[in-house]
Amino acid sequence: MKKNLMDILACPICKGDLILNVVEENEEEVISGTLYCPVCKEHYPIDEGIPNLLPPDLRN
Amino acid sequence: MVEIEYKKARIRLGNTDLVYEPAEDSFLLADAALKEAKPGMHILEIGTGSGFVSAVLLANLKEICLVATEINPHAARCAKTNAVEVIRTDLFKGLTTRCPETRFDLILFNPPYLPTSEEEKVPGWLNYAFDGGTSGRETLNRFLDEVRDYLKPGGEILVLISSITGLDAVKEKMEKIGFAVNVVARKKVSFEELMVVRGKLF
């Protein structure tokens, strides 16, 4: 995902802002990392460049 | 990996046991979207599947800003290989409504529309591509209940429906939400008629 995608992403549970933590990135985009919701205390994974914003019970 | 070409786009398809394979409905929505989309627009496709419709738009229009959502992990990965910026989520769940500037000019949706009972469900993620609940309109109705919050004033939606879905019920619901409603494309295929319905906010 490109970093500017952060402008439109939200926690799927509370719709609050998320904090991006990058583990791996290239010139274009974030390849892996997490999106953290400080209100719900939930980490959402970014894998293969795709942010996974499903609630935890639907994630896998 | 199987690839198809459509209107300047080359689209890689996923395993058809896991990812919906583009069909007449996909082509009809892509054609209608090409007519509505303008350069500079912010476009969202809900439930992009293989990424077919979004990839056709990206291949034919410069300077559009396009993102898509998809619930099925296999389909999301397929869309990503087609260079579609995809977010794995359920309809609009992972998207914000907080600031008006990030809302969309055009939102596209080809919903699952087959009336489906418990016994008729397909195993696994592919069920999300077909299962419209017992009415055939359950996912579309969830989409319509929320879509206004993600559109700019004057923004518009294009949804694919079938004669099985029932145009009148969809039209009535869209008008209640505040859309001016038109059918902008039609195609008869075997036992059903496919339609692209446009809703434009006043």
Image (cartoon, coloured by chain):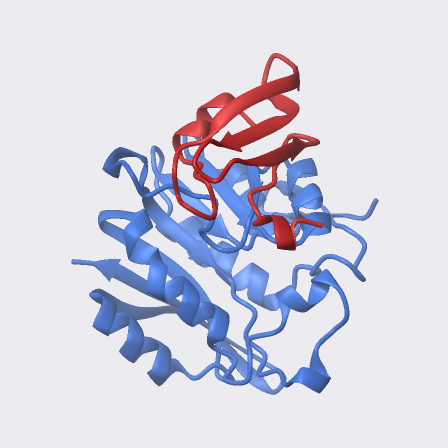
Chain colours: A red, B blue
Taking A41 as reference, is B131 left or right?
right
How many numbered callouts?
0
Left or right of residue B83: residue B45: left
Q: Is residue B134 above or below residue A12?
A: below
Identified at 38% across, 46% down, the residue is B37
Quarter of the image with the C terminus of chain B in it: bottom left
Q: Position of residue A14 (x, y in %)?
A: 41, 45
Give A7 or B27, whichever is nearer the viewer. A7
Q: Nearer the viewer, residue B189 or A17?
A: A17
Which residue is most to the top? A27
Is residue A12 or residue B68 the one in the foreground? A12
Residue B128 in the image: x percent, y percent? Answer: 63, 65
Residue at image x 40%, y 35%? A8
Q: Is residue A41 or residue B124 the one in the foreground?
A: A41
At x 66% / y 59%, what residue is drawn?
B22
Image coordinates for residue B105, horizontal then vertical, percent: 31, 45
The answer to which quarter of the image holds residue B159 is bottom left
Q: Looking at the picture, does residue B134 appear above or below residue A31?
A: below
Determine whether B165 is above or below B81 in the image. Answer: below
